Image: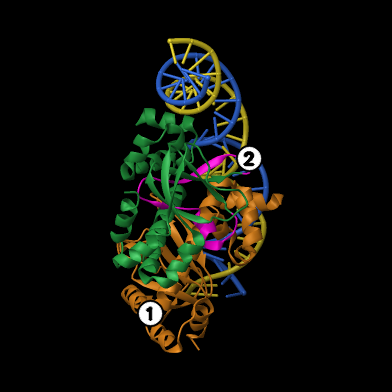
Chain colours: A orange, B green, C blue, D yellow
DNA sequence: TAGAAACATTGATCTGCATCAACAAATCAA
DNA sequence: TTGATTTGTTGATGCAGATCAATGTTTCTA
C-alpha cells in the first residue's frame, strides 16, 4: 500500500507508538509528478515536505544567467524539500523537479511543525533528518573545497555508484559542477 | 560572570525552566586557547561542543597536499564543533583553531546527547541549532555553486561586513576559496 | 517508424584564478 | 628598538576546466 514505505522509513529510525504513527501518516497526501515537472513557484516559500515513493527528484540552484546547478538528488525512500525555505519561511532559492515520473507523498509545512510539538518522537525523527542533511551538505562542501573535478568524480563512483549508473552524463556533470564535456573527457581517461 | 552569555544565548532561543537551565550549565567547563592553538587530535572523533565567550575560532578542512580551506568562523556568542564528527562519532575531517586568544565553555559530547533525552527544551534548542547550521551551510554551498570570486566577495561585504573588518586578508581570501593575491586584486577594483 | 530534439563525444580555443616571484609594509619576539 | 617573520601588493606566467563547434548517437513524440 502507498504508505508502507513511509511507515517503514519512520519506524526504522525512531521508536514510535502505532497510534502516533497513524496520526503522522494521516497528514500525508499523494502526488504524482511528470518528467521535468517543476514543483515550486518562484517567490513563494516551501510549503510542503515530500517523501519519494518512486522515481527521483532533483533539487537545484539558479544562477543569475539562468543556468541550473544541481544541489542534490532524492531517490526512492528519501524525504526532500527546499529545506532552507522550509525552515526559514523565506522565498525559495532552491527548486525541485522530477527527472522521471515520480510518485510522492507530502505533508504541509504547518502540519509538519505542529506535529513536532505534539509528538516527541516526531521531533526526534526531524532531528535525525536534520543531522543527516547537515552531514551530507558538509561532505559536499568539503568535496568542492578540497578536490578537483577528477577527484570528485572518483569519490562519487566510490560512494554513490548508482548515481553514475542511473543518471545521464549531463546530470552527473551538473551535480559535480563541471561541464558535460569535461566529464566525458574524465571518463575516457579512467 | 562566565556563564552569563551562555545562559542568555539559550534563554533567548528556547523557553526553559531555570532549574533545567542550571542542569545544562553545570555540564559546561571553561577552556582558554592561545592564538593558533589547534583544538583537535587527528583521527579522533569530536568529543566536545564549544561555546565562544570571547575571541574567535576557525574551522577548516585539510586538503591532500596539506593546505587548509576555511569552512567557517565562530565569533563571540556562537556554538561550534566539528559537527559532522560530533553527530556521527567518526574521526574528524574538519579541524578547529583559535585565530586569537579565545575563551570557551565546553560540554562533553556524551553529556550533550544525554541531556537531549532528559530535557525536551534542550532537544528543541539543538533542533534550532541544527536548522541554523544547515541554512548557513546551504547558503555557502549556493554561493560557491552560483557565484564567481568577485560576487562572493561582494556578498560577504553585504551580509557579513565584520568578517572583512576583523579578519586578515589572508583569512578572508581563504574563506572565499581564493588566493590572497586574487583577493588583493579584487579589492583594488571595487 | 520517421523526423525532431536532446545527449554524448572529440577537437580547438578562451579565461578566471592559481602559482611563482619580487618587494614593501606590518607585526612579532627578544 | 631591531632583526625576523608574516602579510599585502603587483606583475608575469601557467593551467584546469569553460565555452564554442562539429558530428555521431540515442530518445522522444506524433
Disc 1 on helix, strand or loop?
loop
Q: Can residue A35 be seen in this view?
A: yes
Please state the horizontal and vertical placement of residue B128, each as a whole percent of the image: 37, 63
- The answer to whether residue B73 is magenta is yes
Number of other residues with Cα within 10 Å of mark 2, as a class: few under 14, some 14 to 19, many 20 or more: few
Residue pictured at 55% horizontal, 48% vertical: B40
For the C terminus of chain B, give its image quadrant: top left
Q: Nearer the viewer, residue A59 or B123?
A: B123
Residue pictured at 32% horizontal, 40% vertical: B161
Residue pictured at 51% horizontal, 85% vertical: A4
Residue pictured at 34% horizontal, 67% vertical: B20
For mark 2, name the chain: B
Eye-nearest disc, 2 or 1: 1
* Left or right relative to B157: residue B99: right
* Left or right relative to C20: residue A137: left
For mark 1, name the chain: A
Task: Give how far apart the Cα atoms at labels 2 and 1 are.
Answer: 48 Å
Q: Which mark is residue A101?
A: none
Which of the 4 image quadrants contains residue A38? bottom left
Please state the horizontal and vertical placement of residue A107, each as a whole percent of the image: 38, 77
Number of other residues with Cα within 10 Å of mark 1, as a class: few under 14, some 14 to 19, many 20 or more: some
The residue pinned by badge 1 equals: A119
Please state the horizontal and vertical placement of residue B90, each as a whole percent of the image: 59, 59
Q: What stretch is highlighted in magenta?
A: B64-91
The residue pinned by badge 2 equals: B65
Disc 2 on helix, strand or loop?
loop
Q: Can you say whether B24 is above or below D17 in the image?
A: below
Q: Nearer the viewer, residue B180 or C26?
A: C26
Which of the 4 image quadrants contains residue B8? bottom left
Amino acid at each position: 500500500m502507498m504508505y508502507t514505505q513511509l511507515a517503514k522509513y519512520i519506524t526504522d529510525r525512531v521508536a514510535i507508538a502505532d497510534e502516533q504513527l497513524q496520526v503522522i501518516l494521516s497528514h500525508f497526501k499523494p502526488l504524482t509528478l511528470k518528467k521535468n515537472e517543476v514543483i515550486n513557484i518562484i517567490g513563494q516559500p516551501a510549503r510542503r515536505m515530500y517523501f519519494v515513493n518512486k522515481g527521483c527528484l532533483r533539487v537545484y540552484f539558479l544562477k543569475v544567467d539562468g543556468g541550473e546547478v544541481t544541489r542534490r538528488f532524492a531517490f526512492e525512500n528519501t524525504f526532500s524539500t527546499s529545506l532552507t525555505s522550509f525552515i526559514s519561511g523565506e522565498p525559495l532559492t532552491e527548486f525541485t523537479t522530477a527527472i522521471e515520473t515520480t510518485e510522492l507523498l507530502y505533508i504541509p509545512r504547518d502540519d509538519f511543525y505542529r506535529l513536532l510539538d505534539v509528538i516527541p518522537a516526531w521531533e526526534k525523527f526531524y532531528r535525525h533528518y536534520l543531522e543527516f542533511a547537515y552531514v551530507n551538505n558538509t561532505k559536499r562542501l568539503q568535496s568542492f573545497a578540497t578536490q578537483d573535478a577528477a577527484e570528485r568524480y572518483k569519490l562519487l563512483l566510490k560512494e554513490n555508484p548508482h548515481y553514475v549508473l542511473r543518471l545521464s552524463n549531463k546530470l552527473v556533470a551538473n551535480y559535480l559542477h563541471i561541464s558535460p564535456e569535461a566529464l566525458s573527457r574524465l571518463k575516457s581517461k579512467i
